[in-house]
Image (cartoon, coloured by chain):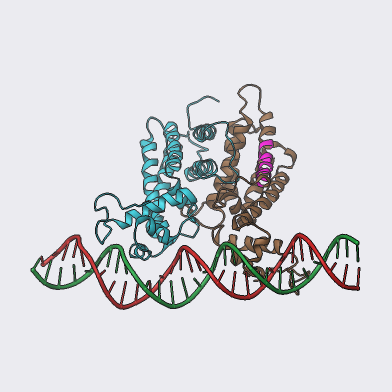
Chain colours: A brown, B cyan, C red, D green
Amino acid sequence: MRFTNSPPGRDSYHHGNLREALIAAALVMIAERGPAGFSFAEVARAAGVSPAAPYRHFRDRNALIAEVARLGFERFAADLEAGWNDGRPDPVTAIENCGRAYLSFARREPASYAAMFEPGFPLEDDAALLRASEAAFGVIRRAADAACAVHPGPGRPPAMMVALHLWAMAHGIASLFIGRPSAGRRRLPMSPEDLLEAGLLVYMQSLGLNGTQR
Amino acid sequence: MRFTNSPPGRDSYHHGNLREALIAAALVMIAERGPAGFSFAEVARAAGVSPAAPYRHFRDRNALIAEVARLGFERFAADLEAGWNDGRPDPVTAIENCGRAYLSFARREPASYAAMFEPGFPLEDDAALLRASEAAFGVIRRAADAACAVHPGPGRPPAMMVALHLWAMAHGIASLFIGRPSAGRRRLPMSPEDLLEAGLLVYMQSLGLNGTQR
DNA sequence: CGGTTGATGTAAACCGCTTTCACATGCGCT
DNA sequence: AGCGCATGTGAAAGCGGTTTACATCAACCG
């Protein structure tokens, strides 16, 4: 499998856009075998260059994974933002849509999701990556803010805590039931999407955030 | 670092309990660098034996990780069972205790937890491992059953769904906020334990599973 | 235009890991 | 005491990953 992308297609000594080709190859391999399932030399082979070439673009294998994660967080934040859609038509429905966007991302981009949450090495010293992940969580945080604002006077739950609960529930379901199988994986009586929607509804109902009876 | 354990301490040709020593060494290395962060030869070195010795006990590196995961699931199930404590003093409190036991395990045995949920390879063909993981989930499932039984007549939630929600919430919090840092990690305004307890309370309150007002 | 410079890719050497083999050791059973 | 099987060794073959010194090329500049 070559990833030399048509324009300048590698008819010459230089590749042309090796950096992007390496990222694309890494995405495929991570999707197939996880963040630990490929080597720096292997992506080089997939891109049709010598094993030493990638070192011109990334300090090492970890830096490549970190870049995959950073780009993933950017698209992730955009997806969540689109799902949230400024809280329309109403906060509860918007949060459900946001949850669906969350799982949809994990499903469409399992490689990015894995690089983001199971990189296999620290990956906390990368400032750009940190900023990207902050942006993604920011969407959830703002959604929780808006939803909590609906809550009547006293006893209003702390928005940060609500945001963390929403995130944990979504991540828990994505991590357990989407992507490459792990040990805990088991057959579900419903789709992960339905499972998450039900969980979010139950949670938010208790907070009095929706108009439903109870 | 040697793992030759004091009683026959390796004064002789044979190790004495190499199998356990290899598992112990693997646990240390997984805790430090993740399931992908060690080689078969390296655990052999740590145990003070030749690189070929481990093959007498495990088919390959993956089999070693799978065994670490299996033993982890056994202790995990026992911990959850102890937390649940047959639903005493009452189902809601018992589920909170179960949640605390969940996070406590992830904290005390980060290596086991990682091997169980992020092994880095399929690990679903191992029957013994599957059984062990079933047993662990069974505890959560029974807790959800018992809790749901308290619910008044119609509108009773499906226990399986509740079990999955509880598991997802606990796993989400453990995965995001306990263990070696990942990208999504951020500073919490509260301990993971308090975060989970609050989340479980909010969730169960909505189901009418506790006696609290609202 | 021609030369220089820096970015990009290569070739090959080096190193460690994996796996297998024949062989050594000694524990436990009779 | 002696036998047999489980367990550990040593060496070697083969791979694959990483690294260093060198090759190529594009862009810039006088």
Query: Could you tell me residue A146's position as x and y percent?
Result: 70, 33
Is residue D27 found left or right of A119 in the rendered image?
A: right
> Residue A130 occupies which quadrant of the picture?
top right
Magenta residues: mostly which secondary structure? helix
- A193 part of magenta stretch: no
Front-most of B133 and B49? B49
Whether residue A93 is visible to the viewer of this picture, yes or no, is no
Q: Is residue B10 above or below residue A77?
A: below
Position of the N terminus of chain A, as image quadrant, is: bottom right
Whether residue B209 is visible to the viewer of this picture, yes or no, is yes
Front-most of B179 and D20? D20
Residue drawn at the location 45% of the way across and 48% of the way down: B31
Query: Could you tell me residue A203's position as x and y percent?
Result: 58, 36
Front-most of A49 and A209? A49
Front-most of B161 and B31? B31
Query: Could you tell me residue A62's position as x and y percent?
Result: 59, 55
Query: Could you tell me residue D4's position as x and y percent?
Result: 19, 72
- A137 part of magenta stretch: yes
Q: Is residue A205 above or below residue A31?
A: above
Q: Is residue A6 above or below residue B191?
A: below
Position of the C terminus of chain A, as image quadrant, is: top right
> Residue D27 occupies which quadrant of the picture?
bottom right
Magenta residue span? A129-142
